[in-house]
Image (spheres, rainbow, N blue to C red):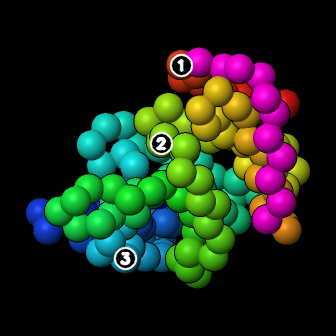
Amino acid sequence: LAWLQCEDDLSCVVTIGTVDDPQMVRTALDPAVLPAGFFGLPIGTFSPDGRWLAMPLYRSRGRRGAEGVTVSLIDTQTGTETEQFEGSSLTPFDTPLAWSRDGRWLVFVSGADIHLWDVTNGREVTLDVDLRGVRALAVR
């Protein structure tokens, strides 16, 4: 289980747990960070082994709006945000996330391309496939 709770001042906490212990780990996000789903449907996905929660986040500039977007990996055992993929063209509402079966690759759409992020070493591969308006993504 994972859920996001935000207060009026936009301080947000990610809670990760199990059916037996639903509030096992709580992670407070940096106040300069706003989850991509805050103004729409929440977007996030667990890795196949349940070790990671991938979540797109806005990096805020305060009153001036969002500076950029990152996809962060949160360790489900510790609640620690461990890895981030940053991309200026990454738009979270148009960015479905999907994992490869082995949990090595996190796949998402950014602009008109498919991006594959190797979470074991941070390497990115971009597939130039000229996509537009993708709302769903599946990996086999």
Task: Locate residue 68 relative to residue 50 in the image: left or right.
Answer: left
Q: Which residue is mark 3?
A: 30
Q: Is residue 50 above or below residue 36?
A: below
User: Is 40 colored magenta in this rendering?
Assistant: no
Disc 3, SS: loop
For residue 21, side relative to residue 32 (left or right): right
Q: Is residue 125 magenta?
A: yes
Camera-side residue: 73 or 25?
73
Name the amino acid, label 2: Pro
Q: Residue at x 66, y 20 (%)?
A: 131
The location of residue 1, given as percent across then percent down, is 50, 56
The residue lying toward the viewer, choosing from 52 and 61, is 61
Q: Position of residue 84 (x, y in %)?
A: 62, 66
Residue 135, x across and y down, in percent: 54, 23
Give the residue type at disc 3. Asp
- Could you tell me which residue is drawn at 29 percent across and 75 percent down? 31
The residue that appears at 37% across and 45% down in the rendered structure is 37
Q: Earlier in the sequence, mark 2 or mark 3?
A: 3
Q: Is residue 140 above or below residue 104?
A: above
Q: Is residue 96 visible?
A: no
What's the magenta region?
A: 122-132
Mark 1 lies on residue? 133
Does residue 69 appear anywhere in the picture?
Answer: yes
Residue 58 falls in image quadrant = bottom left
Q: Amino acid at mark 1?
A: Gly
Q: Which mark is residue 92?
A: 2
Q: Check contact, mark 1 vs mark 3: CB within 8 A.
A: no
Label 2, residues with CA under 10 Å away: few <14, some 14-19, many ≥20: many
What is the spatial separation of the Cα atoms under label 2 and label 3, in whole angstroms? 18 Å
